[in-house]
Each structure stands twice: as structure tokens, then as C-alpha cells.
Image: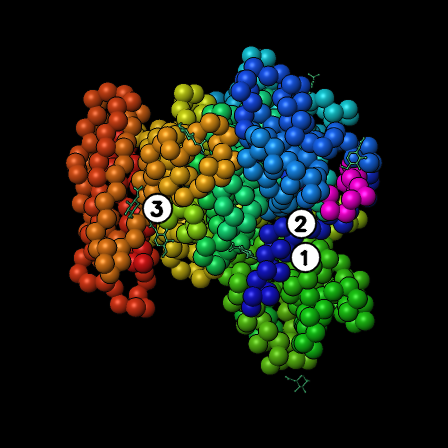
Amino acid sequence: MKLHYSVAIVFFVSGQLLLLLHYLPTTSAQLLPIVHDHADDMQIYIIDVERHQHHDLLSDEDLESWHASFLPNSTLDSGAPRLLYSYRHVLSGFSARLTPGELETIKSKPGFVAAQPSQRHHVETTYTPGYLGVTGKNGWGATMMGEGIIIGVIDTGVKPTHPSFDDSMIPSTPPKSRWKGNCTYKGFPCNKKIIGAKALQYGGRTSPLDTEGHGTHVASIAAGSFVKNANVLGTASGVASGMAPMAHLSIYKVCFPNEGCHSPDIYAAIEQAIKDGVDVINMSIGGKFNATFYEDAVSRGSMAAIQNNIIPVASAGNYGADPITLCHSAPWVLAVGASTTDRRIVSIVELGDGRTFLGESAYQPTTWNSSTLFPLEYPGSNGNVNSRGCAAGEMAKLNLKGKIVICEPELVDNAKMGEAIYKAGAEGMIVLGFSTQGYTTDSFPDVLPTSSVNFKARMAILYYYHTNKPNATAAIRFDGTQFGHMPSPAVAYFSSRGPSRMNGGLIKPDVLAPGVNILAAWPKDVGPNPSPLATHTFNFNSGTSMAAPHVSGIAALVRKKHLGWTPSEIISAIITTANNSWTARSPDDIIIDEISNDTAGIFTTGAGMVNPVKALDPGLVFKITVDSYIGYLCGLGYTYSEVFQMVGQKKNCSGVIHLNSTDLNYPSIAVNLTRTVTSQKVTRTAKNVGNAREEYIPKIVQPAGVDIFLSPNRLKFTRMDQEISYEMRFDMRGSYPSQGSDMIRRGKIVWDSGKHVVTTPIALTFA
Ligand SMILES: *[C@@H]1O[C@H](CO)[C@@H](O)[C@H](O)[C@H]1NC(C)=O
Ligand SMILES: *[C@@H]1O[C@H](CO)[C@@H](O)[C@H](O)[C@H]1NC(C)=O
Ligand SMILES: *[C@@H]1O[C@H](CO)[C@@H](O)[C@H](O)[C@H]1NC(C)=O
Ligand SMILES: *[C@@H]1O[C@H](CO)[C@@H](O)[C@H](O)[C@H]1NC(C)=O
Ligand SMILES: *[C@@H]1O[C@H](CO)[C@@H](O)[C@H](O)[C@H]1NC(C)=O
Ligand SMILES: *[C@@H]1O[C@H](CO)[C@@H](O)[C@H](O)[C@H]1NC(C)=O
Ligand SMILES: *[C@@H]1O[C@H](CO)[C@@H](O)[C@H](O)[C@H]1NC(C)=O
Ligand SMILES: *[C@@H]1O[C@H](CO)[C@@H](O)[C@H](O)[C@H]1NC(C)=O
Ligand SMILES: *[C@@H]1O[C@H](CO)[C@@H](O)[C@H](O)[C@H]1NC(C)=O
Ligand SMILES: *[C@@H]1O[C@H](CO)[C@@H](O)[C@H](O)[C@H]1NC(C)=O
Ligand SMILES: *[C@H]1O[C@H](CO)[C@@H](O)[C@H](O)[C@H]1NC(C)=O
């Protein structure tokens, strides 16, 4: 099962990405060669050094010379420069090529603080704005659809000529006083939508053009312009747009085919985004779920972003459905999990015995006869993994003429399996889901008639095949694009789960946003080829990478409406207005987890599905200062050098109040009760951003086995921006729960003024 798990994720979530990597030939020539010097042990390091005493006065050239003074010399034997980037904002230091021996010499120089080897990371719509309830009047109207806001996308680049980046509706590029970036790569056209574009690779210059698709997809989800009649092979047709369709985009390409995304380039991109003046940054970059904050380029870079008033949004990761698989769990980064929507691109499997199973495919040719039963073939019944996975070599040995073939996505994606069986004469394909994928299905732009079904259907179909072979038959019936699928939203199996290893006192992921089969811009053809149906404009993609840019778009809308709010206040607005129920019927209808089709845990949903309209007017916010974050890092026991790497300034732990994660003024709360510690107190301070005079009354949903007491239990505000603190006491009711019961329990405190509803989600763990 563990084997299926990892392979399935690679395929299901980044399938298209892997596929497209094989089509690179023309563009890879544009990539800079990686410098291989004679010294085999030459490595790229990020070096943190003390800030120069005149840091703020130094010109970029002077800063670079100061950094270069730590290096043995400026060039390698090959002539390549040692110094890749000199950083001013994102961290205090530089990245450079060094041997371990040279690094030792640098370590002995005065001013040296820390060194880390370069790390490699990976990149992990028509319908979604409407699904999230943003419409002209209540959401977009009030925020002018993000007009004037600049969203930075740190990813695989973008295809600028795509219709989603048409600028005819965008009034103008922001004035020079606000926008310092530019777009000067020859042959890469920018406009009023894409106002900046840079590729950062080992300090060299290369094209920001997207050759993979991920970055184009992400950028259009966050801020794509309206495109009429967007569809994938004719399915899911409608008007496509991003969450903030009037916002500008600034593109930073740091992820390259076959190369991944390297931390020196990620830092350089964040540095550039700070200099350029973006408002929100979107990093769809993966991480390691057990990395410390200073080891994680996204967490560390985001700390610099919030110090510069930029809102960082990151994907939670695609490592579910196991617990403790979350990436980027820092409290200053909004971590977004992925949910389904209620749309399915329906392709039904009908077995010879009349039973039917719901599946999906985006390729639904009208010439296909949905009632013809074809003989059913399962090459994998021989037990060979290559046969199960419909690998080209094995399929070439078979005669699949006139058959529907069962394939399992263990090795390659739908398109590769489809091509292999098509060549062997097959008429259609059934793709089986694994139990580790639960009930999540994929609407892939297949290359022949296909149905991708969930693991429950898998067991029934294989059982039918084995008991009826060689007489087993099946038909594939296309039912087009359908809405209203329930339960929805539900959490996708791949969405990374908490709790975080770093933040015991708060809930991660923070919120959910749509991340399954998201239709958005795509730079190249998908589907059967050659075929008149093949489409080059849009594609479906799944992943928390697709969820995060929805929230980046929402953050842009909130920023537009409340220009003075800090990143922590905007993050608070998005968390306290999210919704953990999937029905209007009852708040107890907690969002379903697609791994089990059962109620999702609090560390799976976080605060629940984002609600952009409510996030624009949250009533109260929980604010966190940069000094509190530093106190929190000190509370984690970070050393001087580790804190320096995070905040890059002359601040150390002797000067600030140390905080527990429970003590951070975070909009969610996680507390532990044990056999000996049966009572805990937590304090929060709410700031009034609703009406000047507003009184909030609490509604407490107690976790099973726990009493919550509030003091005071009324929040009576008399002016704007007024802050009121209150204490929550969590008391174990009765005795410690018996083993075998669920030890993680869900509760919430809902402050309700009649005008605003502010929800603090609570996770209570019997530890
Ligand atoms: C720089 O130093 C490296 C090794 O430390 C040496 O191989 C190289 O020749 C030096 N380059 C110059 C231009 O001196
Ligand atoms: C564009 O931006 C880069 C990086 O900030 C800068 O080095 C370059 O001079 C700028 N070019 C123009 C034409 O402004
Ligand atoms: C972090 O996780 C990776 C793989 O998941 C593992 O190889 C490594 O040992 C872990 N490191 C720590 C410190 O737990
Ligand atoms: C579709 O297939 C069914 C059963 O094989 C057949 O009866 C029917 O005539 C076919 N329809 C068309 C339009 O070919
Ligand atoms: C398959 O069909 C043949 C011919 O109708 C029949 O003899 C045989 O018993 C069937 N096999 C199974 C497993 O149903
Ligand atoms: C609760 O206990 C878990 C281990 O069971 C720990 O990781 C976490 O940090 C604790 N949370 C708090 C708030 O102390
Ligand atoms: C929560 O979301 C569900 C599903 O979209 C919706 O039916 C319900 O009305 C929402 N609840 C609130 C309080 O907004
Ligand atoms: C999931 O559970 C719901 C009831 O909560 C049920 O109606 C639905 O059929 C189930 N879905 C599947 C695919 O079994
Ligand atoms: C920490 O800061 C205090 C005062 O801000 C200073 O006296 C002390 O030397 C600093 N410690 C280090 C290791 O820099
Ligand atoms: C952190 O919390 C623990 C109990 O959860 C408490 O004993 C400790 O004093 C707290 N530390 C700080 C710095 O507040
Ligand atoms: C940006 O979007 C990607 C999805 O591609 C997501 O993984 C990432 O976390 C987002 N980052 C920010 C800063 O918005």
C-alpha cells in the first residue's frame, strides 16, 4: 500500500507536469547550463552574515562587494562567478559556489553567522469564483476585483500570450512610485496584466516563459482575466477567470524542467518581489514536512515578506492522507489545503451485469457509442507491475483490438497508458483508483475514451472481471459536465494533514480552497493528438498548488479593500470567516474527507472552506506583530544564529518576550490536556475592524469531554481599532478518555454581534 501511495500521488497530482517534462526539447536549450567546475565538491551555499553597520546606506554594488569580501576570489576556474546572489531584504547574506574547505575558511571570518547548502524544492477557472460565492455585487464589486493589486507568482514562469492574460480590461500599470519592477527579457511580451517577469536561475538570465504549465495554471487561478467559452476538450465550458481578475501579475520563474526549484533562486525571487513592490506572493513550491523554519525557503522567505507587508500564501502540500504531512506550517504563512468542488466531468463504467460506477474523464468524443459493450481486458491479472501499469513495452506484446482495458496508474499517467493501449488496438480504458486515493477522481484530458474510477469501484470491477473472464464486458458512458455532486466541498485525499510538528498551539492547515480538477490556463496541447478536439488553452489540474492561488487571489481582494491591514490581519480575516460545514442545514455537517467519505478531522480541514465575501468584512481580527513572531522563534528554543537566519536583523532572544505557539495571538487554537494537566488557559486579543460600537456574544461549541470558560464573556467595543483581551479556560470534564476513543476533538468559539460572526476553531488533543 505504501508503494501505491507515493506513486499514485506523483501521478495523480502532478501527472500532467511529469508528462510535459518529456516534451521539452526546444526550450531546454534556453536554460543555462549548470556550472560544473573541476572541484567535484563545489556546492552552492546560502551564507548568512551580520548586517553591515551601514546596511541601509549601502548601494547594491557596495552591498555586493561587502558580501564578495567573504569569498576567496570572485571567479572559478571555469570563469563562472562564485557569487550567485547578494541579498538585502530576504535575508542578510548571499549565495555562492564554494568547496567545503573554502566554507570552513569563511566560517572563521568575523561577521559570519550561518551557512546552509542549497536545497531543491518542487512545484507541487471557470467555475471556482462562482463556487466560492464571489459575484459582482457582494465580493468583486466591493474590491474592484483586486484592481491595482499586484500578485507575485513564484513558480515555473508563465505563457504571456495566453488569453487569460489579456489586458484589455485592465486600466493601467501601477505608477512608478508603487511598482519598481520591469519586464525586459527579449521576446517575452508583458502587458498591463503581466507587469513584471523574471527568471532566476543560479544568478543567470533566462526566459520566464513557462514550458511546463504549472505556473501558467497557478497565475491564472489567482488573477486570470475573463475568458469566454473556456473548456477542456469541450467539457466544463464557461467563462474562466481568476479570483482577482483585475489584479496585476508579476512572474518570478524559479522552477525549471528536470531541475526543480533551488533555494538560492527562491530567496532571490522573494528579494526581487519585495524590491518590485508586490502585495501578495504565491509560492506553489513544495517543502519537507519535517523541515525547521530556517531550513524551509518558503517559511524563511515569507518571514521577510511579512516584514515588508506582503501576504504570503502557501500550499499545505500533497502528502496526504497520513497525518503530520504538512509543509510550510509557520504561523506567518497561510497554509492552504485542497478541496473538491461539486463539479464532475462524468464518465460512467457500465459492466456486462448492468452495474454502473461513477468515473471521470475530460475527453468525451461525441462519436463514441455509449451503449456498446466491449470485451474487458485486465493485463495486470498476470501479476506483472508493468502490465498492471499498462507500460508501452508490455502493451505492445498484446492484442487489445476492440477491447476496453483496465489500467492502474502505478508507473505513468493516463495519457501514457492510453497511448500504449491505443497502439495495441484498444477502444477504451478504465483507470482504477487506489485505496490511498479514497473517493477522489480525476478528470484527465485522456487520449481515448476513458473512465477514471475510485477505489471502491476498483474492487467491484476487478472482482467482476475475475469471476467472468473471459466473458467480462464493459461500456463507457459519457454524461458530460455535471454540477451538484455531494458531499461537496470534500477534502482531497492528497491534501497534506496536520498537526504541524512545529506549531503545537495552533491549527494547520489553516483553510481549504478548491484544488481538484481545477480548470485554468495551460500553455500547450492536451488530449488526443492529432485530433480536432485537442485543445491548447485550458486544462484541469489537481493539487494544493491549485488551492493556494485561490487564496492568494482572495488575499488580494482583502488587501484592496483594507489597504492598511497587516498580513497577520488579512490572514486572520480569511481564517475566522471560513466555514467547516458542507451544508446549509447544520453547522454539524462537518466537511467530508475523501479518503474515507467520512467526517474530516480538524487537522485536515483547518478552519474550513474559505469564504471570500465574508473575509472582506470579518468584524474582528487577531493581529500578530513581527516581534511576537520573533518571541515565538525564541520560545521554540532557536539559537542566535537560527533566529538571525529567520529575521536577518540585530534582534536576539535576550531582547524579546518568549512565547509558546499557544500564546501567539493566532486565529485558531490547539490545546493539549493530559492525565496530569487537566486544565489550560489561553489568551487572545481581538481588534475591532467592524463598526465602532459593536457587542459580541459568544457561542461555544465544546470539544467532547471538555468545558470551556470565557472571561470576559462579552466583547463590547466602543471604537474602531479598539483591542479587547479575553481568556479561555479548557477544563477536562470527568476522567481522561479511555484508549481507543478519538483523542483529537473539535470545538469552536463563535463571537457573534448580529452583524459579524468570528469563528475561532479549536483542536483539543488528549495527549
Ligand atoms: C579562485 O580560487 C580557486 C580555488 O580556490 C582557484 O582554483 C582559481 O584559480 C581562483 N581563480 C582566480 C581567478 O584566481
Ligand atoms: C529591470 O530590473 C532589474 C532588476 O531589478 C534591473 O537590474 C534592471 O536595471 C531593470 N531594467 C530596467 C530597464 O529598468
Ligand atoms: C524528515 O523526513 C525525511 C523523509 O520524509 C527523512 O528522511 C528524514 O530523516 C526526516 N528528518 C527528521 C529530522 O525527522
Ligand atoms: C450503439 O451500440 C448499440 C449496441 O452495440 C447499437 O445497438 C446501436 O445501434 C449503436 N448506435 C449507433 C448510433 O451506432
Ligand atoms: C463464457 O462464455 C462461454 C460461451 O458462452 C461459456 O461456455 C463459458 O462458461 C463462459 N465462462 C464464464 C466464466 O462465464
Ligand atoms: C500537544 O502534544 C503534541 C504531542 O502529542 C505536541 O507535538 C504538541 O506540541 C502539543 N501541543 C501543545 C500546545 O503543547
Ligand atoms: C457553509 O458552506 C455550505 C456549503 O457551501 C453552505 O451550504 C452553508 O450555508 C455555509 N454556512 C455558512 C454559515 O455560511
Ligand atoms: C458518501 O457518504 C454519503 C453519506 O454521507 C453517501 O450519500 C454517498 O453515497 C457516499 N459516497 C460514496 C461514493 O460512497
Ligand atoms: C543580544 O542582544 C543584547 C541586547 O539587545 C546584547 O546585549 C547581546 O550582546 C546580544 N547577544 C548576541 C549574541 O548578539
Ligand atoms: C508554554 O506553555 C507551557 C504549558 O503549556 C508552560 O508551562 C510554559 O510556561 C509556557 N512558556 C511560556 C514561555 O509561556
Ligand atoms: C501560490 O500558489 C501555489 C499553488 O501553485 C501554492 O502552492 C503556493 O503555496 C502559493 N503561494 C503563495 C505565496 O501564494
The answer to whether residue 146 is seen in the rendering is no
Confirm if mark 1 falls within 8 A of ligand 11.
no
Direction from residue 486 to residue 84 in the image, left or right? right
Q: Which residue is drawn at 65% across and 73% down?
A: 473
Q: What stretch is highlighted in magenta?
A: 31-44
For label 3, being within 8 Å of ligand 6 is answered yes
Looking at the image, tell me whether mark 2 or mark 1 is earlier in sequence order.
Answer: 2
**Which of 567/390 is in front?**
567
Residue 103 at x, y percent in the picture: 66, 40
The residue that label 1 is drawn on is 413
Mark 3: which amino acid? Gly
- Examine the rendered structure and indicate whether residue 622 appears above or below residue 101: above
The x, y position of residue 160, in whole percent, is 69, 29
Residue at 57% across, 33% down: 112
Q: For the residues labelled 2 and 1, say whether their Cβ atoms are less than 8 Å apart.
A: yes
Dominant secondary structure (helix, strand or loop) of the stretch shown in magenta: loop
Compute the Cα span from label 3 to label 1.
Answer: 40 Å
Q: How crowded is mark 1: few (under 14 residues within 10 Å), some or many (20 or more)?
A: many
Task: Determine crowd level at label 3: few under 14, some 14-19, many 20+ residues with C-alpha closer than 10 A.
Answer: many
Quick check: 91 above or below 428?
above
For disc 2, the marked residue is 16
In terms of secondary structure, where does tag 3 sit? loop
Whole-percent x and y of residue 89?
55, 26
Tell me which corner region of the image, top left, top right, bottom left or bottom right, holds residue 403: bottom right
Mark drawn on residue 455 = none
